[in-house]
Image (cartoon, rainbow, N blue to C red):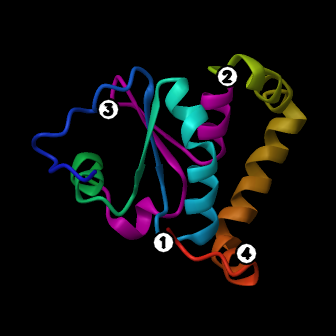
Amino acid sequence: MSVDAETRPVVKGAALGVVLYDGQCGFCSRWVEYWAGTLARHSFEIASLDEPWVAERLKTPYQELVTDIRLLTADGKLVSGADVYLYVTRRIWWAWPFYAIFNLPGLNRLIHSGYRWFARNRYCVSRSCKLQPR
């Protein structure tokens, strides 16, 4: 699946973008695998932040990259953190209510702070649930 940074197109044929996740996180790996079919049906690809082309393309150190889930859009824009969930759910008709609710001012702050807490603690969640990276 890994393609070198020189030959890989921005989104390798995906119309909307590539969801980039922490491949060393058991929870993250399982979560993305669970949603892979849905993402593919809605023109999103998935790739691990571990893939060499990612750091090369984004010109960002690995330790900084893995602090958040990322989305590289078709036009080359980088979306990070809770905004990835909002970006994706806005483009899936049955998930749009999630986007609409969590885009409201108070709830938008809630999804961002909840995401930040989870992102900081995802390895603890993975260990507690005995979730190994796939």
The answer to the question of whether label 4 and label 2 lie on touching residues, with beta carbons closer than 8 A, is no
Where residue 95 appears, x then y in whole percent?
75, 26
> In the rendered structure, which disc, 1 or 3, sits on the residue that comes first in sequence?
3
* Disc marking residue 24: 1
Picture quadrant where residue 107 is located: top right
Q: Please name the residue shown 35% across and 63% down the image.
A: 50
Write down the residue under mark 4: 125
> In the rendered structure, which disc, 4 or 2, sits on the residue that comes first in sequence?
2
The answer to the question of whether label 2 and label 3 lie on touching residues, with beta carbons closer than 8 A, is no
Q: CA distance from mark 2 to mark 3?
A: 19 Å
Mark 4: amino acid? Val
Q: Please name the residue shown 39% across and 58% down the image.
A: 49
Can you say whether 43 is above or below 39 in the image?
Answer: above
Which residues make up the magenta segment? 60-89
> In the rendered structure, which disc, 4 or 3, sits on the residue that comes first in sequence?
3
Q: CA distance from mark 1 to mark 2?
A: 27 Å
Write down the residue under mark 3: 11
Write down the residue under mark 2: 90
Q: CA distance from mark 4 to mark 3?
A: 30 Å
The answer to the question of whether label 1 and label 4 lie on touching residues, with beta carbons closer than 8 A, is no
